[in-house]
Amino acid sequence: MLPPQVPLWKRAPFVRLLPPLIAGIGAGLLFPRLPFPLSATIPALMAAVCYAVYRCLPLAGRFRYRYLPGLSIHLALLALGWLAVQRADWSRRDDFSGKLPPADSSYIVARLDEPPIEKPKTWKAEVTLLEIIRGKTREKIKGRALLYFRKAGAPPPLYYGDRILMRNRLQPIRNSGNPGGFDYRAYCARQHLYHQAFLQAADWQRLAGSSGNTLKKLSFRCRDGCLAVLERYVPGTREAGFAEALLLGYRDNLDKTLLQAYANTGIVHIIAVSGLHVGLIYLILLVLLRPLSTGRQGQLLRGILLLAALWGFAALTGAGPSVMRAALMFSILAAGVLFIQRRDDTGNRLAASAFLLLCGNPYWLMDVGFQLSYLAVLGIVLFQPPLARLFRFPYRLPAAVWKVTATTLAAQVFTLPLCLYYFHQFPLLFLLSNLVAVPASSAILVAILMLLALSPFPLPAGWLGKAIGWSIARLNDLTLQMDSLPHTRWEGISTGVTETVLLFLVTGCLAAWLMRRQPRNLLWALALCALLAGRYGMRRAATRQQKKIIVYNIPGYTAMDLVDGLHSYFIGDTALLRQPLLYRYHLFPARTLLQVHPDRHGNRHIFKKGPYLQFYHIRLLLLDSSFRSFIPAATLAVDYVILRQNPPVSMRWIGKYLPGSRLVFDASNAPWRIRKWKSECEALNLPCFSVPDKGAWIADIPR
């Protein structure tokens, strides 16, 4: 084993190889439309030139320019990353399904990529599009889509691998367009999902035969068997849903309010299958397979069984980025011990797993789970040892508590910038909640594994299932109580890319200072903090000058915000404010991005009387279902007409009595009515904006 003073980048080759690959993938994602000869080929040619120049140099020249081979390798890896993105981009293909005309008279053959999942009004399934049929012509196509089967009694008789023939009801996947909202379209595109369709029973039929991957089909059967065991023996819908998420990462039956509570208290990672779960299973397997540790053949069989179990569990949980990272790292560890009798450096295993996963799927670089998983482990590897050495305890219990605390702190510090960037909140009780939740969830996970082993025996399985249900209920109650406490989280934090980069630099400088105790690293951290504070101050000053009118895209609801500086005035369905999940998904991101708070004291620049509303010099007319047409004495001067909740009004009346006004149709109106209004506006040459079709409507008011 190399001495500890050898730098990490010298004893861990993949630490040197990973950055150029990431740079190539980043360039491919940043410039997706560059033609192939101008992208990956250029760094590849530069790599070849560097290596050729090095080979042509005399011995003294090779020593002087000894960095050229390394440079050529880095350029080749940059080209590899760029090429991987281009190969993974299905939109470059001639048979890409995104080039299909939406909702025409053609038929499509599709294959289910998962068993249908029950939703409140539909059954949802991801499918791969195989063929399009136009008359007597059949063409191969490449793409994936989300299908929603309308509920009509029993679930559709479909499973993974089944093929269906359906009418072409495909529509492009759209975003809500709300400010700061989740980019659902980009998220789906990274999984090659570009379309969605809502199908009635008459729109599809199952075809004979089945296809798909045999191992994947087996993993779905095993997963369904595990889910059936948990639903049978763990009492309580909420408790069974938690057990499914803890063991398999299956969240479709997990209570959404409970999930938000776990996120608010900083322990949502225990129900995201990751290194904690894989490591626990790895330790259990080591204990169970200890009799095979003697002899070369026994060790070989033990290693094979370990690898098979790890990757079988990864497949069972859906092979997400975090579990794949953990499975690959433990596989490298097991293979190193088995074949070369050496435990590889943890940093090298971490970089090697990222390198291999990104070569397989470069889009994982933009996956939030992938980023948080690797940053958490990187923080533990680099930051936990010096933190743990800060305090020494002579007794086991306080030493163990401090070790868990140091691990939690290390992971939280390194993931903090991304958590603020993506989720805009920071749980203040994360230390306390993790001290309780991590050991409790580990014990519950072991009990669930025992339950699966005892499932053929109803009596002991029933007792153990009740104990598991009781334990989960107590953990859920404790989490909900902590979430209900006041001032348990810091939320509404808006950080852009610049602030996130500065936070990472501050974190890196603090980590370097803690590990090496060099004062300059602390000074750099303080200087970066001052720069970060100045950046926030500039943003705050700009925020005070903003004036906007926002009509949100929330299906079935009316929601408007009048933004004046740091305050917002809400107009719409107050039910949105009383439903935490709807509020957090739709309104909270926008108000966080704009850094505004509800105005509880009134605003002298807002005048509202009946359907009339004036904000500064902008005049609006809000028409809803209570509106009745009338003949005014004179034409009305209105800048915008907001139509909400299906008002019985004709566009001809608006064009005649509200000349010069612009129309906005919000998301509370019926789709058929919006289509009717749009056709009337087109005939009358009236400007209109459909929020369900184009996303949130935002009007900036000039200063």
Image (tube, helix red, strand yellow):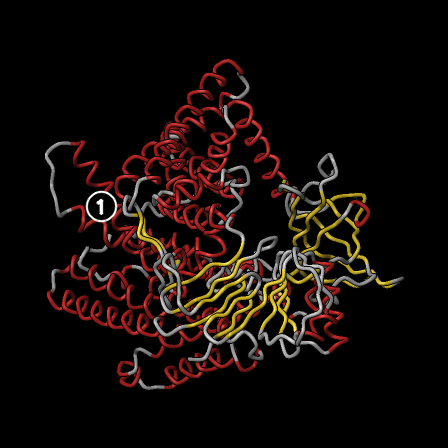
Q: Residue at x 41, y 28 (%)?
A: 473
Where is residue 33 shown, x and y percent of the image?
57, 77
Q: Secondary structure at mark 1?
A: helix
Image quadrant where residue 99 sits: bottom right
Task: Residue 291 in the image: state x and y as whole percent.
Answer: 38, 27
Please tell me which residue is depicted at 17% across the width and 37% down the height of the picture. 399
Residue 111's place in the image compared with 566, above or below, is above
Asked whether, in this view, residue 589 is left or right of residue 400, the answer is right
Residue 662 versus residue 423 in the image, above or below: below
Q: Residue at x 41, y 26 (%)?
A: 447
Is 578 displayed left or right of 495 in the figure? Answer: right
**How many other residues sit within 10 Å of disc 1, few (<14), some (14-19) or many (≥20)?**
many
Q: Is residue 50 above or below residue 293?
A: below
Q: Nearer the viewer, residue 165 or 319?
A: 165
| The one of 138 and 628 positioned closer to us in this rendering | 628
Task: Find residue 445 and report its horizontal and vertical position in percent.
Answer: 41, 31
The residue carrying mark 1 is 406
Report which quarter residue 659 is drawn in.
Answer: bottom right
Q: Nearer the viewer, residue 294 or 547?
A: 547
Estimate the x, y position of residue 622 in percent, counting from the top left.
Answer: 59, 63
Residue 193 visible: no
Q: How many marks?
A: 1
- Relative placement, left or right, of 429 versus 465 is left
Q: Is residue 336 above or below residue 83?
A: above
Residue 392 visible to the viewer = yes
> Is 608 on the left or on the right of 623, as rendered?
left
Q: What amino acid is at disc 1?
A: Ala
Q: Quadrant of the C terminus?
A: bottom left
